[in-house]
Image (spheres, helix red, strand yellow):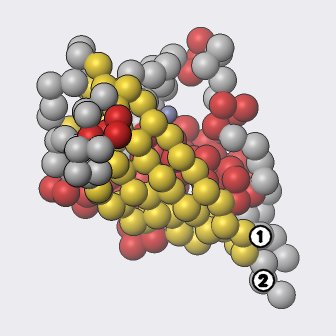
């Protein structure tokens, strides 16, 4: 019998001047970017935690600690590639990932196809198995105040039989 496991992931980073804005592996023109030890890609990080959660393999902080200088400025697509390897080594197959990015600005819609391509390539799955959605909060909360951007993700994996 085939067993499936779902996982959930969440991430948020602060918007600051002087950083590129990278979401879903895509650099998006904007006057500010997300602050963080790595490239602070909220969509990739939420998906990474969803996948690790589905596999019961801990979380992103455990695998890529901020305290490790090797993780400074690391591309989050590289993080996803390594997580795909961790899952593959355990015999797990990624079925799909779905992420919602919450941002008041900039408009993310035009960048979604490129995000899906980049995330799917990093995970080694088909573009159709990665979904990216963008939402605003109608001005409410830290995302609405443009203080930061957050992302929520779910992922499904097939466990080894
Ligand atoms: Zn993050």
Q: Which residue is mark 2?
A: 2
Residue 93 visible, this angle: no
Image side of residue 30 versus residue 58, left or right = left
Q: Nearer the viewer, residue 152 or 157?
A: 152
For label 2, the SS is loop
Task: Report the residue at 44% width, 58% height from top.
Answer: 99
Question: How packed is label 1: few (under 14 Cα within 10 Å), some, or many (20 or more)?
Answer: some
Which of these two is toward me, 102 or 109?
Answer: 102
CA distance separating discs 1 and 2: 7 Å
> Is residue 64 at all visible to an observer of this figure?
yes
Left or right of residue 16, residue 45 in this image? right
Q: Quadrant of residue 159?
A: bottom right
* Residue at point 27%, 41% (across, down): 144
| Residue 123 percent coordinates (x, y) | 52, 55
Residue that label 1 marks: 159
Mark 2 nearby-residue class (10 Å; few <14, some 14–19, many ≥20): few
Q: Quadrant of the N terminus?
A: bottom right
């Amino acid at each position: 019998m085939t067993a499936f496991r779902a996982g959930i992931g969440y991430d948020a980073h602060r918007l600051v001047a002087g950083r590129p804005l990278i979401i879903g592996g895509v650099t998006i023109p904007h006057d500010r970017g997300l602050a963080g030890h790595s490239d602070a890609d909220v969509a990739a990080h939420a998906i990474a935690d969803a996948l690790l959660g589905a596999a019961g393999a801990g979380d992103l902080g455990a695998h890529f600690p901020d305290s490790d200088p090797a993780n400074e400025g690391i591309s989050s697509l590289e993080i996803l590639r390594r997580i795909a390897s961790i899952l593959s080594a355990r015999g797990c197959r990624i079925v799909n990932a779905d992420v919602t990015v919450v941002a008041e600005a900039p408009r993310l819609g035009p960048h979604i196809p490129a995000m899906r391509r980049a995330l799917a390539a990093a995970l080694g799955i088909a573009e159709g198995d990665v979904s990216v959605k963008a939402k605003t909060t109608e001005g409410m909360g830290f995302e609405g105040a443009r203080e930061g951007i957050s992302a929520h993700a779910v992922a499904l994996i097939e466990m080894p039989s």
